[in-house]
């Protein structure tokens, strides 16, 4: 796939997310979700860094970072769902 | 950090060894250890916070039960200690960002005995940051006192 198309789609996705967030969330809720995203990324990136020091190697790095990414994304999804629902 | 000849494996620079036996690298090694431990504690709190909030998606009674647990003195004490972890982690993180940008570690210079490594040169930044963390902790005591009365 063309990179410029990917770039365009990512911009459309970001704009769409912002629009949906603006429609369904208050300013405080948007801040809470964004803060959660930053904290989760920082936390799980750090955890992945630590774990790859204990279990060095390419395969371990892929598994550890994959797990951290999945856990972080899952928790972020929970934050979004909880914020939209309540 | 020592390297075995030929095998090129790191023997004392990774994992728990790096965490526990860093005394020769000075106080910074223990600050490094504390930064990671407080980071893990903060991540644990964030995960618990999200799961607690998301328990409402399962049932409100489950959420009420879990909220009742958080009102125990033990949890309140742990949350109080979280303030220390947050203050330390935040200000030490700020120091790491400054060091990353080369602020506070001086210009490269010729190694003249007695050697003065970048650890010693950036130590004033460490001291200032720890003082700021202590100031945040002390000032927040007043806030806690005000809200609890």
Image (tube, rainbow, N blue to C red):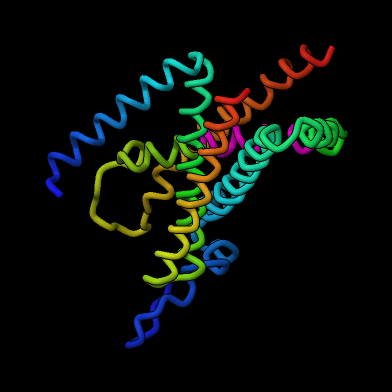
Is A29 part of what is drawn in magenta?
no
**At x 19% / y 37%, what residue is drawn?**
A7
Tell me what residue is drawn at x 28 percent, y 58 percent.
B111
Question: Is the stretch drawn in magenta largely helix, strand or loop?
Answer: helix
Taking depth in this image into account, of B98 and B147 the one nearest to the observer is B147
Q: Is residue B84 visible?
A: no
Image height of A67 relative to B133, above or below: below
Residue B85 magenta-highlighted: yes
Is A25 above or below relative to A51?
above
Does residue A20 appear in this view?
A: yes
Q: Which residues are magenta?
A: B78-91
Which quarter of the rendered picture does the N terminus of chain B lie within?
bottom left
- Which of the 4 image quadrants contains residue B62? top right
Residue closer to the observer: B69 or B102: B69
Side (left or right) of A66 relative to B133: left
Q: Residue furthest right?
A: B73
Q: Where, quadrant-wise, is the C terminus of chain B in this rendering?
A: top right
Q: How many discs mark residues in the rendered view?
A: 0
Left or right of residue B17: residue B51: right
Q: Locate residue A40, reporting x and y percent.
A: 51, 40
Instruction: Please name the residue shown 60% across and 32% down the image.
Output: B87
Residue farthest along the bottom direction in this orientation:
B6
Image: B28 above or below B139:
below
Q: Image check: B101 left or right of B93?
A: left
Asked which quadrant contains residue B33, the reply is bottom right
Residue A60 position, x and y percent, is: 44, 69
How far across and how far down the image is residue A53, in percent?
47, 65
Instruction: Give the image location of residue A80, x and y in percent.
Output: 52, 31
> Residue B58 versus residue A30: which sits nearer the camera?
B58
């Amino acid at each position: 796939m063309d990179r410029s198309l990917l770039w365009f789609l990512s911009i459309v996705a970001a704009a769409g997310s912002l629009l949906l967030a603006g429609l369904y969330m208050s300013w405080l809720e948007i801040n809470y979700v964004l803060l959660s995203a930053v904290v989760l990324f920082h936390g799980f990136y750090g955890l992945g860094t630590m774990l790859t020091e204990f279990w060095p190697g390419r395969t371990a790095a892929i598994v550890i970072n994959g797990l951290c990414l999945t856990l972080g994304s899952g928790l972020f999804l929970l934050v979004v769902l909880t914020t939209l629902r309540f | 950090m020592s390297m075995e000849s030929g095998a090129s494996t790191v023997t004392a620079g990774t994992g728990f060894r790096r965490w526990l036996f860093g005394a020769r690298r000075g106080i910074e090694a223990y600050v490094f250890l504390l930064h990671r431990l407080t980071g893990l504690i903060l991540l644990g709190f964030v995960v618990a916070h999200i799961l607690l909030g998301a328990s409402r998606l399962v049932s409100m009674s489950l959420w009420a039960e879990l909220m009742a647990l958080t009102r125990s003195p033990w949890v309140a004490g742990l949350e109080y200690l979280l303030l220390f972890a947050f203050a330390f982690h935040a200000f030490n993180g700020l120091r790491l960002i400054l060091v990353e940008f080369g602020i506070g570690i001086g210009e490269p210079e010729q190694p003249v005995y007695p050697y003065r490594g970048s650890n010693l040169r950036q130590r004033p930044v460490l001291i200032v940051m720890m003082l700021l963390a202590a100031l945040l902790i002390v000032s927040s005591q007043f806030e806690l006192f005000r809200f609890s009365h």
